[in-house]
Image (tube, rainbow, N blue to C red):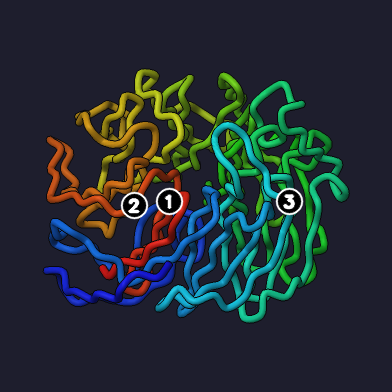
Amino acid sequence: MNRPLLIFTLLTSTLMAGDWPQWRGPGRDGHTQQDRLPAILPEQLKPVWSIEIGPGFASPVVEGEKLVLFDAQNQEEVVRCLDAATGKERWRQRISAMYEDEWGAGPRSTPFIHRRKVYAQSCDGHFVSLDIDTGERIWEVSFEKDFGVKFLGYKANEGTATRRGNNGSGIADGDGVLVPVGGRDGNSVVCFNEKTGAVVWKSGNDEAAYSSLVIGEFEGVRQVVAFMGDALSGFDRTTGEQLWRVPLRTNAKRHAATPVIHQGQIVVNSHTFGVIAFRPGRVNGIWEVKQAWANPGLKINLATPVLIGDAFYSQGPMKNFVCFDARNGETLWSRAGFGMDYSSIISDGSKGVGLTDAGELILFQPDRTAYKEISRVQVCGKNWSYPALANGMMYLRDQKNLFCYRF
């Protein structure tokens, strides 16, 4: 149900425009590129608009005047395009039957937008390319029919994507669309032609977990970095060759966090091994991966840390907020009372804001020496979804509603 329109001004500098077209923002790193966070949050933050939505954990994404939402409608996983200014629906497209387990119902993989196309992946492994203006299907694949990767649900013995749903988000790069299909027969990561859906290459033999792909450059080679069920791997972006692989075994194969690339290092975290930084490189022409540092006590489970300056900020493992050094992984400080299991962090480089799984929005000043909270306000209900900060607005969801706040 639409709520009354209320536009207010926050005490901040002039807002600048920018899109939020994919998981964790334009750079897939939790940072805005043009929008700025406010100087302070008001005691009561009223939405510009809100609408009722179906269940799911997929985050909203925005390009220009279009907002793309992936939720459950009438027992189906449905991609919907909304008007970003009003929340009015422009089109909808059914993707697959709804998946549900004890953690909740609905899609879990965040869609992404690239070259006027929307890409979405259902829990049971249907991946589609849609026209952003009309919602028309351009091409689609089935992980099971096309690559032999069956979605087993409760029949699976371990907690990979074949049991809990295909949560990890693919990524677009030039004319390629990279997807964590997760097959054991050379299908871990598949690169599709963005126009036709033809397979450009496929590589790897690891099952998919819940992590999203990222792209980085190491020693001049552009690579797709994949945090799969049993390993962290790097694939040549052009050819698909698996250049290196680091075995990483986690209880229940619950690799949920997205790798973070920083100064030639790849930082990953889990509830089993804590936080580890790896550095890929070549020795006599052969790719090797060395551990740069580790913090085994910082067992961050679901959240992905965000780098601000030379420190990472993240939801911690004990209902806390933590800061740790990007140079050596040392925990710098911890603050209790920050959500339960998950928080999403967004930074504009000078400030940070966290949306907790309890629906609190917390504005903070990044500082290596101490936790410095500026203000906090309740903005939604329970959620495990990343907000989108785009064109002066913050869009966020819980299990019942999608909200638009002016920032």
Most foreground residue, 250 or 394 = 394
Percent of width and height locating residue 254: 56, 28
* Residue 317 image-quadrant placement: top left
> SS class of the residue under badge 3?
strand
Q: Which residue type carries mark 1?
A: Asp
Most foreground residue, 371 or 62 = 62
Is 232 placed left or right of 176 in the picture?
left
Residues at circles 3 and 2 in contact by the CB criterion of under 8 Å: no
Residue annotated with mark 2: 380
- Which residue sits at x=25%, y=50%? 378
Residue annotated with mark 1: 398
N-terminal label among 2 and 1: 2
- Pointer 2 local density, CA inside 10 Å: few below 14, some 14–19, many at least 20: many
N-terminal label among 3 and 2: 3
Is 158 placed left or right of 341 in the picture?
right
Residues at circles 2 and 1 in contact by the CB criterion of under 8 Å: yes
Percent of width and height locating residue 394: 34, 64
Q: CA distance from mark 2 to mark 1?
A: 6 Å
| Residue 403 can be seen, yes or no | yes
| Quarter of the image that includes the C terminus | bottom left
Residue annotated with mark 3: 97
Q: Which mark is residue 142?
A: none
- Which residue sits at x=75%, y=65%? 193
